[in-house]
Image (spheres, grey):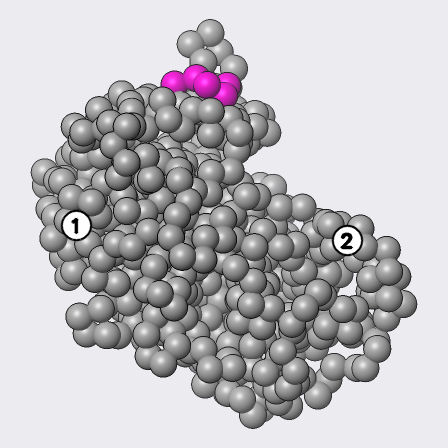
Amino acid sequence: MSLNFSFLSRLALVYACFFAILCNAKYDPSDPDVSREIGVRFGPGSSGAFLAQNGMVTSSSFEATMAGLDVLRKGGNAFDAAVVVQFVLTVTEPYASGIGGGLFAVAYDSKEEEVFTLDGRETAPDAAEPDLFVGINGKVDKFSSRIDGGRAAGVPGTLAALAYLLDEYGTISMAEAVEPAARIAETGFIITEPFARNLAAHWRRLSKFPETQKLFSRPGGGPLQAGDICRNPELAATLRLIGREGVSVFYKGPIAQDIVATVNESKENPGAMSMADLADYKPIRREPVVSNYRGYTICGMDMPSSGGASLALMLNMLESQGAAFNGEWTAEQLHTLIDVQNLAFADRNAFMADSDFVSVPTDVLISKSYAQKRIGELKPNQGLSTPVSAGNPYKGVATTNATREESPYTTHFTIVDKNRNILSITSTLEQHFGCGLLVENRGFLLNNEMTDFNAHAKDSDGELTPNAPQGGKRPRSSMSPTIVLRDGKPVLALGSPGGSRIIGVTLNVLLNVFDRELELQEAINAPRVVARNRDPEIESPLYRDQALKESLEGMGYQLIDSQAVGSVQAIRINDSGWLEGAADPRREGLALGY
Ligand code: DON
């Protein structure tokens, strides 16, 4: 079992009993089947990952993993479990994802033996213009004020995406799917240490949103503390209403009215969302971005996420270098790893955006020949000075290095069922607590995904950048849910939160598995090196390796000591056909299977 905070582990058993009772399931810790699920590592090649034969769920929430596992054990498939997990996350990780946000899913449908993706990204309200974030003084507002209030909220896509997955592939009804989450929202869940820490850190910001503060306040005032119970009866009622009436109640009915009112009457930066914006929302099924690396087939998310194409470009550049990255990291390897990320990031920033609105040269960017050309810019024994310029996948494209800081809050979950259907889903509200607004009387937070557009919409030539805001468009993302195949069969599914660091985080874990051949948990735990066309961020203990550090500094890099980059949730299908589930120790996470 991968359970990553001592506070959580102390609570785990008690909570498991509590949850099992809530779910009306039988829970008997003396039952060897159950005790295996609650924490015994077993099976061939145990690596610290949780091993199971039938099904596996890994998520960043104890309750969500438990609820997903319960679905699988009762015969539901991975699609059912994913929908249930996302509803529970709306309750227990309300600051990171939820029905007020958006998601990307990469899925393996075992019946058709195909990978498909689902784009449940938020859309800009029709009224959005490129100057969305320009204040009355004619200047682009500071980041700290862009993130708050209705203006930053996109039309939520998560619920529509869940409904698609359930309608097309699920075996349970929407009413059944919402019930575990509704029950937890009603009876309450225990605030974990990380939740409490995050809440305290954002308390001042949340004072601008009294309804939100109230939901997360202790009875006597002040933020909920670790060990407190958080209840959200309004959210329980909202979920059950969706269960009874279907998602049209959210996109066309009374919940839509409340979303519009909340966004447009926001005291902070009111927005301009209409009922038509919500009614028109559609999740989009897309082909995955597919690339090959040393015999593996990597299936990722296409635009409007830059994740899949950026990863493909990075892996292609690395492959064209020849040697695999095995053994301990050397300074030369890290030099390559850093600059490959920098080069790909320059291209991401310049060219990648919603391809339904702007032309994106994805085919060129993910081609082996382009990667070969691009890696030619690497200098032996010398770091590239950042920002590096974008490449030229076709002539006449305006380039810009405009990028921005993305917050580290989002969530990823991965599920495999007994038929080997797979869901790899990254889901977000963008910033912690999204735009801060709790939808009136409905108990869920709204995203601030519009801040993923370029706030500085034009480049230095006055041309609109590809990722400029526009009505109906989806902001560029970095989310990189991924499924890896070998010989046509799925072998690994993973993803991470972490804003624009997600791409580098995913690359690190993939290389640790593909090249360094680490066990899954080790591949996740290993210190990461992330570069985003700026100074590279290096996790300790790698950062503290004096010899490596000096070599890299000798190449001209200014290293940043970085901590806890990303939170990977992954499942591997090993050579014996067993499932290995691993959660990232950097944040909360729990992998369980049966
Ligand atoms: O779509 C994106 O790339 C960002 N809005 C995701 C934000 C994020 O990952 C924050 N996370 N930890």
- The chief SS type of the magenta part is loop
Between residue 155 and residue 508, name the one nearer to us.
508
Write the residue at 83% across / 65% down: 552
Characterize the local packing of mark 1: few (<14), some (14-19) or many (20 or more) Cα atoms within 10 angstroms.
some
Q: Is residue 239 left or right of residue 569?
A: left
In depth, the one of 386 and 179 nearer the eye is 179
Location of mark 1 (residue):
76
Asked whether residue 309 appears in the rendered view, the answer is yes
Residue that mark 2 sits on: 543
| Image quadrant where one finds the N terminus | top left
Q: Where 171 sits versus 176, above or below?
A: below
Residue type beneath disc 1:
Gly
Q: Position of residue 99 (x, y in %)?
A: 31, 43
Mark 2 closeness class: few <14, some 14–19, many ≥20 residues within 10 Å: many
| Callout 2 amino acid | Tyr
Residue 467 % position (x, y): 51, 67
Q: Quadrant of residue 416?
A: bottom left
Residue 318 located left or right of residue 425: right
* Along the line of sight, the residue nearer the viewer: 225 or 95: 225
Range of magenta residues: 225-229
Q: Is residue 393 above or below residue 234?
A: below
On the image, the x and y values in percent for residue 206 come to 51, 28
Which residue is at a point 26% across and 39% down the rendered structure image?
33
Q: In the rendered structure, which disc, 1 or 2, sits on the residue that comes first in sequence?
A: 1
- Measured as percent of width and height from the top left, residue 256 is found at 23, 42
| SS assignment at label 1 | loop
Q: CA distance from mark 1 to mark 2?
A: 44 Å
